[in-house]
């Protein structure tokens, strides 16, 4: 196997910065162990599933090593787009034909039929991703609930002799992750740490309950809302404190027909706005597949299917310019394990593009971040609506 050019991978269209990379040592360990296990078990690629491959480092290294038809699930829309771009840049959009010449199709389209000789196929976290899989490579998620949902899915749908190899940076790993895996697998063994990363190998899937454990549901009587959440959704079926602060002033947001909940998470803001504004049409959008699945379940649980549309997208990139009256926004301030304000900046820029002149952006953010000046520059006149010891709500009017 030739040395894979990890340094050529890019994060784009996700945020890029000198301290942010498109691969880490865990990717390399997973590829090394995955290639060895696949060769030992005689796998060609279609029996391999990859979960949590942020920008394609694992999937494309496997393709480069000759494993084709690999199935992959990435939570973030930006990661899915980065995988396609990186595949094209490295000439891995298609496997070579009989004459050794690449056909050159775009990777996302080329990988749509696993087992057909194409490098990879993108899937949601479902039976199509895992049916018949005998090897699953996983970048460990931060949330234990997300790991629980993934482990259950592998035990539920993969082959009886599946081997799950999960990896992470040692500083982010806990014994609780082993315990979660042990609920779905009879054998769980942590490996020796290498390059500040560690692998955990899980085998012998246990019997699973008839109904998958996610999404979970919670009733918030004070809002007349039922909230649904998959394992990877921020805050689960709870309402995070920042969102609560914005909800406290939601009755001051104008009653408009075209509203976007940008970075919608589990769909709290979109659902409450739709419940309190019967004539509104709301689009809830998020780059996280787990968030989108959660928001769709929340919308269904509250009977809002005909008035709230949920889309998996990167910062509303598929929505038209200047067509929105109101944007609701609770932006993140983390990128993976790093504190980074660039994620919020991208959403501010998206709001500026989406809003009609005179349209309003209502934002809640950590008070220590002092976004008011940036909002004024990027959107227009900005006023503070509410401030607590931890969070600030502002209203910005599009110039």
Image (cartoon, helix red, strand yellow):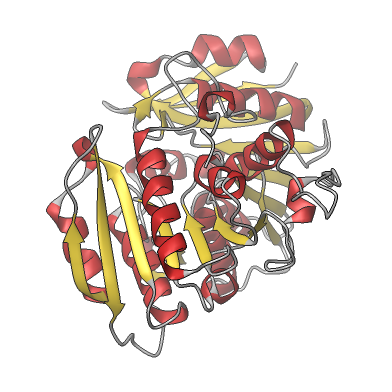
Task: Quadrant for the C terminus, please.
Answer: top right
Q: Is 117 placed left or right of 220 in the picture? A: right
Q: Residue at x 67, y 22 (%)?
A: 397
Q: Image quarter for residue 104?
A: top right
From where the camera sits, is residue 281 visible?
Answer: yes
Q: Residue furthest bottom?
A: 210
Q: Residue at x 42, y 28 (%)?
A: 365
Which residue is situated farthest in the front direction here? 99
Relative image position of residue 287 (x, y in whole percent):
59, 44
Q: Position of residue 82 (x, y in %)?
A: 64, 37
377 shown above or below 125: above
Q: As rendered, which of 196 and 251 lies closer to the eye?
A: 196
Q: For this rendering, which residue is in front, 208 or 352?
A: 208
x, y (%) of residue 231? 39, 61
Q: Is residue 326 above or below residue 366?
A: below
Left or right: where 88 falls relative to 368: right
- Judging depth in this view, the residue of 249 and 13 nearest the camera is 13
């Amino acid at each position: 196997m030739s040395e894979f050019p990890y340094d050529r991978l890019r994060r784009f269209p996700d945020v890029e910065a000198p301290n942010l990379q498109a691969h880490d040592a865990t990717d390399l360990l997973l590829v090394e162990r995955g290639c060895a296990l696949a060769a030992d078990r005689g796998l060609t690629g279609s029996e391999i599933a990859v979960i949590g491959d942020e920008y394609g480092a694992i999937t494309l290294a496997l393709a480069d090593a000759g494993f084709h038809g690999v199935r992959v699930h990435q939570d973030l829309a930006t990661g899915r787009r980065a995988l396609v771009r990186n595949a094209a840049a490295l000439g891995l959009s298609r496997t070579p034909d009989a004459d050794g010449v690449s056909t050159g199709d775009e990777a996302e389209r080329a990988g749509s039929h696993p087992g057909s000789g194409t490098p990879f196929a993108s899937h949601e976290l479902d039976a199509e991703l895992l049916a018949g899989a005998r090897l699953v490579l996983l970048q460990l998620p931060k949330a234990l609930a997300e790991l629980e949902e993934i482990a259950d899915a592998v035990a539920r749908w993969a082959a009886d002799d599946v081997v799950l190899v999960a990896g992470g940076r040692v500083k982010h790993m806990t014994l609780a992750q082993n315990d979660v895996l042990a609920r779905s697998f009879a054998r769980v063994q942590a490996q020796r740490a290498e390059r500040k990363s560690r692998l955990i190998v899980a085998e012998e899937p246990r019997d699973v309950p008839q109904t998958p454990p996610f999404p979970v549901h919670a009733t918030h009587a004070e809002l007349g809302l039922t909230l649904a959440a998959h394992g990877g959704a921020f805050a689960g079926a709870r309402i995070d404190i920042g969102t609560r602060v914005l909800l406290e002033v939601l009755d001051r947001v104008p009653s408009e027909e075209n509203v976007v909940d940008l970075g919608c998470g589990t769909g709290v803001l979109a659902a409450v706005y739709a419940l309190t504004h019967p004539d509104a049409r709301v689009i809830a959008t998020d780059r996280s597949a787990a968030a989108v699945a959660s928001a769709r379940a929340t919308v269904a649980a509250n009977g809002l299917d005909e008035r709230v549309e949920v889309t998996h997208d990167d910062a509303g990139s598929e929505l038209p310019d200047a067509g929105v009256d109101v944007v609701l926004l609770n932006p993140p301030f983390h990128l993976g394990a790093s504190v980074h304000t660039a994620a919020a900046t991208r959403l501010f820029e998206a709001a500026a593009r989406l809003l009609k002149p005179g349209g309003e952006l209502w934002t809640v953010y950590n008070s220590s971040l002092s976004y008011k000046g940036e909002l004024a520059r990027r959107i227009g006149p900005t006023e503070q609506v509410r401030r607590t010891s931890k969070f600030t709500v502002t209203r910005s009017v599009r110039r």
